[in-house]
Image (cartoon, rainbow, N blue to C red):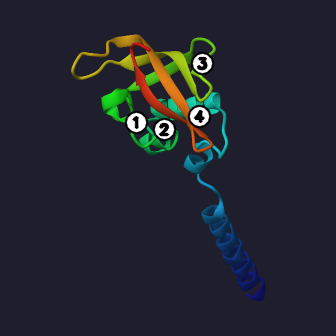
Amino acid sequence: MGRFALNAATMLVGGAILALSACAAPSADSALVPPPGASAPVVLDTYLRALVAGECAIARAAAAPAFSSENGDLCGDVEVSAFSVREDAATPGPDEVVYSTILTTDGSSDGTIARGETLWFYQLEHRGGEWRVVSGGSGP
């Protein structure tokens, strides 16, 4: 009987340690947020992966506060299932880059974005030491 109590206590303590370590571990979501000082390609990749996953909070963490559906943020409005970045970024200025991407979408409810592959540009700016997505659209 004493051996059973010892095994049960060991399992209980082990379970408690496992539960506490799971609570202390970083979530998968926090690992996807761009790290401080991330390069423009890393920030864009973070945004696009979050867009495909439907993780709008993560997508918005990669964007400037003013980035919205009014200036090209598709997260929550258009279902995107895949993306590719087509080429190196254009650099209109030292703190500005523009990437062209191909997004595979289900189209938009208002018909402005077609179902299938869509050419979509993303502008990123270096503000306050961080690269952030500031706008997007079908033309640069």
Residue 20 percent across, percent down from the top left: 64, 69
User: Mark 2 = which residue?
Assistant: 63
The tag earlier along the polypeptide, 2 or 4, is 4
Q: Amino acid at mark 4?
A: Val
User: Mark 4 = which residue?
Assistant: 43
How far is mark 1 from mark 3, CA to CA? 20 Å
The tag earlier along the polypeptide, 4 or 1, is 4
How far is mark 3 from mark 2, CA to CA? 18 Å
Q: Amino acid at mark 2?
A: Ala
The tag earlier along the polypeptide, 1 or 3, is 1
> In the rendering, which numbered label is found on residue 53?
none
> In the rendering, which numbered label is found on residue 91?
3
Q: Amino acid at mark 3?
A: Thr
The image shows residue 133, relative to residue 81, as above or below, that is: below
User: Mark 1 = which residue?
Assistant: 67
Question: Secondary structure beneath disc 3?
Answer: strand
For the residue pair 114 and 60, the one nearer the viewer reads as: 60
